[in-house]
Image: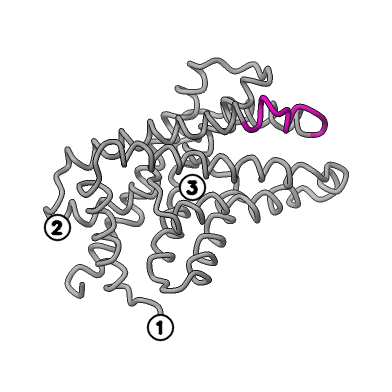
Amino acid sequence: MPVRTPAETLETASNAGLAKASGRTLPHLAIGSILAGAYIALGGALSIIIGYGFPQLSAANPGLQRLLSGLVFPVGLMLVVILGADLFTGNNALLVPPCMQRKLSVAAMMRNWTIVWLGNFVGALIVAYFLVYLTGLTASAPYAKAVEAIGIAKTSASPGTIFLKGIGANWCVCLAVWLALSGRHLGEKLIACEIPVMAFVALGFEHCVANMFFLPLAMMQGAPVSVLEMLTSNLLPATLGNIVGGALFVGLPYYYLNRNKA
């Protein structure tokens, strides 16, 4: 069968968003959110190991590290989409259509986003601490220096810059989710997750859930970043940018363009 039309994709997205916001109990939502944060953290860990594993080549080819990190990071979103976990950034787009159709209240949408954001953070922290920090996965060269540099870079930019990069990141992520919903087969969905997410990683945009892994890991390994700096300099402005990128750049325009056809 061919891929879904834009109108069919909107209907699929609306049904998925409604199910995520009103069709799950709190324990189910919490577990799905923790798993999604863990999946994104796994992609983040892999992007460090592969992307920063060739320092000599990367020194002579500045785009190589970004390309390699971008190629492997999307495994996290693939797991989220295929296995049906709850990702804050994806929900920024998926919950907009049912909200616009008045099948879901704004309060219910905000409640979902809040719970999922917190659950994603828990999942990312679990992977960062137990599977990366305690195992020493990134404790030796060249990874230790790379992790510290990531932490410093992500908290050194202005909140305005992080906000704008947050828009770019979740524009790409939610386009990937939307494309995956248009596919009917596993291969189509995997390719849909790969290409836009690879673009956001290579471009250096800011994804709040990924940073829930990168920044705590950097702090665990001794980077000079405080909890307050992590929140105010990165996670909060990135989160706001991600909401704009997902809700206003994907969920809302594609609802508007296809609502009369769905």
**Residues shaded magenta:** 131-142
Q: Which mark is residue 101?
A: 2
**Residue denoted by label 1:** 2
The colour scheme applied to this rendered structure is one colour
Left or right position of 128 against 252? right
Q: Is residue 213 above or below residue 78?
A: above
Which residue type does callout 3 highlight? Ala
> Could you tell me which residue is drawn at 24 percent across and 37 percent down?
110
Residues at discs 1 and 2 in contact (Cβ within 8 Å): no
Image spot of residue 253 (x, y percent): 29, 60
Task: Give the amino acid type for the residue marked by disc 1 in the picture.
Answer: Pro
Examine the image and state in which quarter residue 237 appears.
Answer: top left
Please provide percent x and percent y for residue 149.
69, 29
* x then y, percent, for residue 125: 52, 29
Residue closer to the observer: 250 or 159: 250
The C terminus: image quadrant: bottom left
Mark 2 vs mark 3: in front: 2
Question: What secondary structure characterizes most of the magenta part?
Answer: loop
In the displayed structure, 13 sits above or below 215; it is below
Residue at image mark 3: 169
Residue 58's label in the rendered image is: none
Amino acid type, callout 2: Gln
Say which of 226 and 125 sits in front.
125
- Pick whichever of labels 1 and 3 is earlier in the sequence: 1
* Residue closer to the observer: 116 or 35: 35
Disc 1 on helix, strand or loop? loop
